[in-house]
Image (cartoon, rainbow, N blue to C red):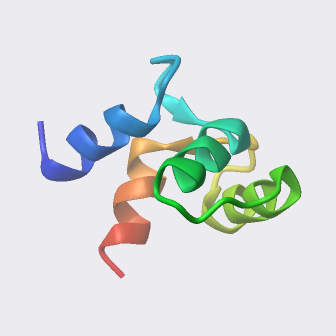
Amino acid sequence: MNDYAVTFNLIDADNDGRISAVELARLMEVLGQPCTLEAAQEGVRRLDKDGDGLIDVTEFGAFLQK
């Protein structure tokens, strides 16, 4: 498992293999940078390359490599 997958799995609270806007908002709150659900949804849209409305580990890794 690569470093991205380990981090991804920490964020993927329901362990479905994808990060939702709700999970992203929860992460931001834990990090002390609360955001609205709308802001989290926009963040997901920016990273979501396959258009399913969620971030998978490949999309997450591609973002972190930038």
Q: Relative to 66, is 25 on the left or the right?
A: right
> Is 48 drawn above or below residue 9 in the view shown?
below
**In this rendering, would 52 be left or right of 37?**
left
Quadrant position of the N terminus in the picture = top left
Residue 66 horizontal side relative to residue 4, left or right: right
Q: Position of residue 22 (x, y in %)?
A: 71, 38
Q: Residue at x 47, y 55 (%)?
A: 59
Residue under the image location 46 percent in, 26 percent down: 17
Q: Residue 11 is drawn in which quadrant?
A: top left
Furthest residue to the bottom?
66
- The total number of labels drawn is 0
Q: Residue at x 15, y 50 (%)?
A: 3
In the rendered image, which quarter contains the C terminus? bottom left
Residue 35 horizontal/vertical position (percent):
73, 61
For residue 28, above or below residue 7: below
Q: Residue lying furthest front in this view?
A: 32
Expressed as whole percent of the image width and height from the top left, the position of residue 51 reads 74, 49
Between 26 and 11, the residue placed more toward the observer is 26
The quarter holding residue 9 reads top left
Position of residue 19 in the picture relative to residue 65 (left or right): right
Image position, residue 4 (x, y; %): 25, 51
Residue at 66% from the left image edge and 48% from the top image edge = 25
